[in-house]
Amino acid sequence: MTRVMLALLATLLAAPAAAHHVGAYVPKDNAVTINFKQVKFSVQARKFDVALRLFETGALRAEMRAHAATLPAGLENETRAALAASDGPEVERRLMIFFAALARDLALEADRRLAEAGGTAESRAATGRKFLEAIWRYYNLVDFAVATRDNKTSVAVRLAFDEAETYVKPATGAAAPADPARLRPPLQRIAQVLSTLIEASPTHARRDS
Amino acid sequence: MTVAAEPHPWRVPPRWVLLVAVLSIVCAELGGASMARFKVELTRWARDAMLARPAVHGLVGVRDVDERILDEALVKFDAGLRLFHMHAEGMGLVIIATTMVAATVARAGVARRVIIALLTTGGAGYPVGYLVWSALIPAYGLERAKTIAEWLVWIPFGSATIVALWWLTGLLALRMIGR
């Protein structure tokens, strides 16, 4: 009887091996966001020499140079100067401008892509969804910094983002299917609000809270 | 000193079954070793193949967007190889254990042969699905590759294993009730 019970147990334990799973993907930071976090945490720890070294040798500075044409003039030099002067709030503000600019450029590019004709609604929604992910990945890093300086901008970006997300969600159950055509206005709003923030920030740091 | 004879000794499954199980484990080890040895080459090949098919993977030509898509596909490509290694190793042992139970418990010749055949083919074929999935990701994308692997390998071979296991469980239950 014990032998039969053991055999039954061995058989039942073997059954789950037949259920297949394909793992889960956890999105990772890219070189720019990793370097941002390194600099940010060094500044928070008031290790400005470390932060300056990480900035000068990392992907943030390279990315600032690559995007120099769409960034406020002198952003890279001013960020480095703020680090050299051990001015934490100013470093945070410069980096906020940089990531806001990256998010704005992605919103503009997404809007341009969606304006082009061609492709099915599903493929356009998928493209929109991927752009939104990329926008959020950058904006999310500086949302707190934005909110502490200009909470109206922060709320406006998040509302526009939430609205955009509803238009690209895949249809499930009773939910309406994705409608990429309606995605453009919130994307344009994100770009416009962030542009205003970038233009106002270097000279007019304001606090609405 | 005398040794009491076992009333119902375990029966060894046929040699071809043991050979298949051992081969499955050998393939798992070779797969794992190759995965580690050629990691860079495999990743480079998969990345190049994906970049050659931007429409399949939904690449838009913007680095900030595409890097996430490529990263996810490469993570899943690697996961497929790892899961093949893990499942082929495990299913080799499952084949040996379950076919031994079947050879011992199933008395009817036809039933025993069918259960053993299902357990062996299902157990050895199922892990190959992960290899197929992984190999198809660069050419067909994540979801399409998964669908192909499911219908071509996972569902038929997985079903064979499940059917055989439930059949064997039923036989064991009948024997227990009969006692």
Image (cartoon, coloured by chain):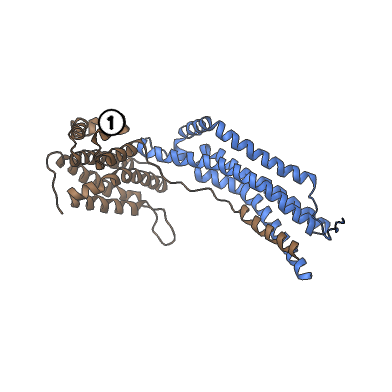
Query: Which image quarter holds the N terminus of chain B?
Result: bottom right
Whether residue B62 appears in this view of the structure is no
Q: Is residue A59 above or below residue B152?
A: above
The tint of chain A in the picture is brown
Would residue A22 appear left or right of A201 to someone viewing this image? right
- Residue A196, percent from left and from top: 17, 43
- Residue A129, percent from left and from top: 37, 47
> Residue most toward the front?
B1
- Residue B134, percent from left and from top: 55, 40
Disc 1: CA contacts within 10 A as few (<14), some (14-19) or many (>=20): some
Of residues A95 and A1, the one nearer the viewer is: A1
> Residue most toward the right?
B2
In the image, what residue occupies the spot 26% across and 54% down? A159
- Residue B13, percent from left and from top: 78, 50
Would residue B86 appear left or right of B119 to someone viewing this image? left
In the picture, residue A116 is in which quadrant? top left
In the image, what residue occupies the spot 68% across and 53% down? B161
Would residue A76 appear left or right of B164 to someone viewing this image? left
| Mark 1 chain | A
The tint of chain B in the picture is blue
Query: Which image quarter holds the C terminus of chain B?
Result: bottom right
Q: Mark 1 belongs to which amino acid?
A: Arg
Of residues B22 and A49, the one nearer the viewer is: A49
In the image, what residue occupies the spot 68% across and 42% down? B24
The residue labelled by disc 1 is A53
